[in-house]
Amino acid sequence: MSRKKRVVATIEARMGSTRLPGKVLKEAVGKPMLELMVERLKRVPSLSGIVIATTTNPPDDPIVELAGGLGVGCHRGSEMDITERLLGAAEAHAIDVIVETTGDCPLIDPDIVDRCIRTYLDSGVDYVSNILERTYPIGMDTQIFSTATLADVDRRTHEPFDREHGAVFIYRNPEIYSVKNVAAPPEFNDPKLRLTLDTIEDYQLIVEVFDELYPKDPAFGLAHVMALLRRRPELRKINGHVPHRYV
């Protein structure tokens, strides 16, 4: 009988950020953003575990300490070579299937992550994500591929751009790898909505969302966030002017 694949979420997180330094440890409802994101990913039924992939830089020591306190894995690697960092995390933690996320997504919806994982496992393709054609709000970003596929990328490219962005080489080379996009259902189709953490305005909106929804239901999902924004449309204006930096 074949061993069940270990499907593990990796969270790329570091304290250095050009637009909002230290953002992953900024707090909402008394908890660091990274802790809130881990809480959400722990609700994904298809996951076997979570590994925070941070850097070897001393300022990232608090991230390592937080991972230990939360009981999740942690791996330290290159700051700029994300391919190396992810592959190192996967090999160190015996990961078969990488569910790549970033610390920019503290509002990520566990049901959306689970849907992407199930699509990957059922389809047999090399890569599944919900970002090839953006339909979900920014901040629900999920990319899935095997450790074997990432190892193949590691052998094929040493271009700094490819190495810095991890999976980008996979979906930019469909002649090598098979890829599939997961589109949002109509009620979640809002690709310009920023639910990501990249600027102070983003942080202010995310704090508002957590303050409103978390005390009543810590397991709130994207449907609850969208309903809140319909009730309080002024919230969208907090970061509505912020341009998104696409890869």
Image (cartoon, rainbow, N blue to C red):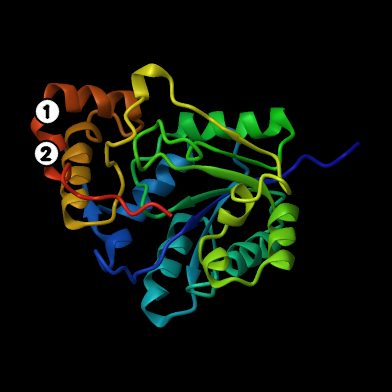
Q: From the image, tell me which residue sits under label 1.
A: 233
Whether the residues at callouts 2 and 1 have beta carbons within 8 Å, the answer is yes
Locate the C terminus by quadrant.
bottom left
Q: CA distance from mark 2 to mark 1?
A: 8 Å
In percent of the image, x 69 and y 53: which residue is there?
95
Q: Which numbered dot is residue 237? A: 2
- Res 147 quadrant in image: bottom right
Q: Amino acid at mark 1?
A: Pro
Residue 84 placed where, x, y %? 61, 69
Horizontally, is 70 left or right of 74 in the view? left
Residue 63 placed where, x, y %? 40, 67
Residue 232, placed above or below residue 70: above
Q: Residue furthest front?
A: 175
Horizontally, is 8 left or right of 121 in the view? left
Q: Amino acid at mark 2?
A: Lys
Horizontally, is 9 left or right of 17 in the view? right
Q: Residue furthest top?
A: 186
Mark 1 burial class by Cα count in 10 Å: few <14, some 14-19, many 20+? few
| Residue 30 visible to an observer of this rendering | no
In percent of the image, x 16 and y 40: which residue is there?
208
